[in-house]
């Protein structure tokens, strides 16, 4: 009788603790303010499902983050074009959420295998925390490649529009309508938006340069501003820029083609050559074994 009463009390205390925990989470969830995403990019489907948790972490944990780390993260988000999707606090919240998911998944797998590995749980925490940063670096590399690929095309469109008699703003609008989609088109859209808001053309171009921090964009912005200040022909300067960017693109392609044989050495030595020797040598080895047995 005493044991039953003790178990009943433990169950009651556990249920009460669960109810208090759920009530506390509900109250904390109510403290999270609503987010206005009217002027932000749309969330991807997977991130949209986890976004309430991201907002929860942002509101209750973001205030304790150091300002130096937030400023560094904000700069990285700006360089990758993700700053219109989430802020620095939200990115840190996403890192914490990935850390919790990685830890929970690893713990579940270890429990299913009936194993205990604190080192695996620790590695899962590190992987979950740093995976968003790795993803951000990969997005930055892809963004740079796309900009380098489409920049000569946009420069050609802008040059033709300027030589046809349009001003720089009209030329950028024409390039946006005719040019290929990508991050560069979005950056030119931001430039046009700044111009419509009353920002001087040089400042709008400098803002684009600060957002992208690429040598090609810096050269384009500097050439455009210098040509307007000196009264030089803008079409001639932009045509020279387009030819230079196109030449650099061909040089990068030639460099990648020359690097391809070197990059193929490792898979050839590790995968292709051993498999080839195995396929060729297996029948010969079987014949030797058969002849030895006979």
Image (cartoon, rainbow, N blue to C red):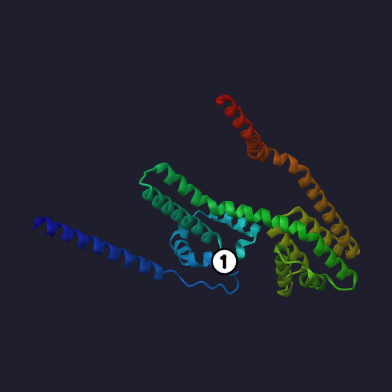
Residue 71 placement (x, y as % from top left): 58, 56
Identify the residue at image location x=24%, y=63%: 15
Label tally: 1
Is residue 231 visible to us here?
no
The residue at which mark 1 appears reads as 44
Identify the residue at image location x=88%, y=58%: 240
Identify the residue at image location x=90%, y=72%: 164
Between 163 and 126, which is closer to the camera in this rendering?
A: 126
Is residue 204 visible to us here?
yes
Between 88 and 248, which is closer to the camera in this rendering?
A: 248
Q: Is residue 181 shown left or right of residue 35?
A: right
Q: Name the element at disc 1.
A: loop
Up-down relation of residue 177 to residue 136 (above or below): below
Residue 147 placement (x, y as % from top left): 74, 59
Q: Residue placed farthest to the front in the image?
A: 294
Quadrant holding the C terminus: top right
Residue 83 placement (x, y as % from top left): 61, 62
Between 289 and 76, which is closer to the camera in this rendering?
A: 289
Q: How crowded is the residue under tag 1: few (<14 C-alpha within 10 Å), some, or many (20+)?
A: few
Up-down relation of residue 268 to residue 157 (above or below): above
Identify the residue at image location x=26%, y=62%: 17
Quadrant holding the N terminus: bottom left
Q: Is residue 281 shown left or right of residue 118?
A: right
Q: Is residue 212 shown left or right of residue 157?
A: left
Residue 149 placement (x, y as % from top left): 76, 58
Q: Residue placed farthest to the left in the image?
A: 1
């Amino acid at each position: 009788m005493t044991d039953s009463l003790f178990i009943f009390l433990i169950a009651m205390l556990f249920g009460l603790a669960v109810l208090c925990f759920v009530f506390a989470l509900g109250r904390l969830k109510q403290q999270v303010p609503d987010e206005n995403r009217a002027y932000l990019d749309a969330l991807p489907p997977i991130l949209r499902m986890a976004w309430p948790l991201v907002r929860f972490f942002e509101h209750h944990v973001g205030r304790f983050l150091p300002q130096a780390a937030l400023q560094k993260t904000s700069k990285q988000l700006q360089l990758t074009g993700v700053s219109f999707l989430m802020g620095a606090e939200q990115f840190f919240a996403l890192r914490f959420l990935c850390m919790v998911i990685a830890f929970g998944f690893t713990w579940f797998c270890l429990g299913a295998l009936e194993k205990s590995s604190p080192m695996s749980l620790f590695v899962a925490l590190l992987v979950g925390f740093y995976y968003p940063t790795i993803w951000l670096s990969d997005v930055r590399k892809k963004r740079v490649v796309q900009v380098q690929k489409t920049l000569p095309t946009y420069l050609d469109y802008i040059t033709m529009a300027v030589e046809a008699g349009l001003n720089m703003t009209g030329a950028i609008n024409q390039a946006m309508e005719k040019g290929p989609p990508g991050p560069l088109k979005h950056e030119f859209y931001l430039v046009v938006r700044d111009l419509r808001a009353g920002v001087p053309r040089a400042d709008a171009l400098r803002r684009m340069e600060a957002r992208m921090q690429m040598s090609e964009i810096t050269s384009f912005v500097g050439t455009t501003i210098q040509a307007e200040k000196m009264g030089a022909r803008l079409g001639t300067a932009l045509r020279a820029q387009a030819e230079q960017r196109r030449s650099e693109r061909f040089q990068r392609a030639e460099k990648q083609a020359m690097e391809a044989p070197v990059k193929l050495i490792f898979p050839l030595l590790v995968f292709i050559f051993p498999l080839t020797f195995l396929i060729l040598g297996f029948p010969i080895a079987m014949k030797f074994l058969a002849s030895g047995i006979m």
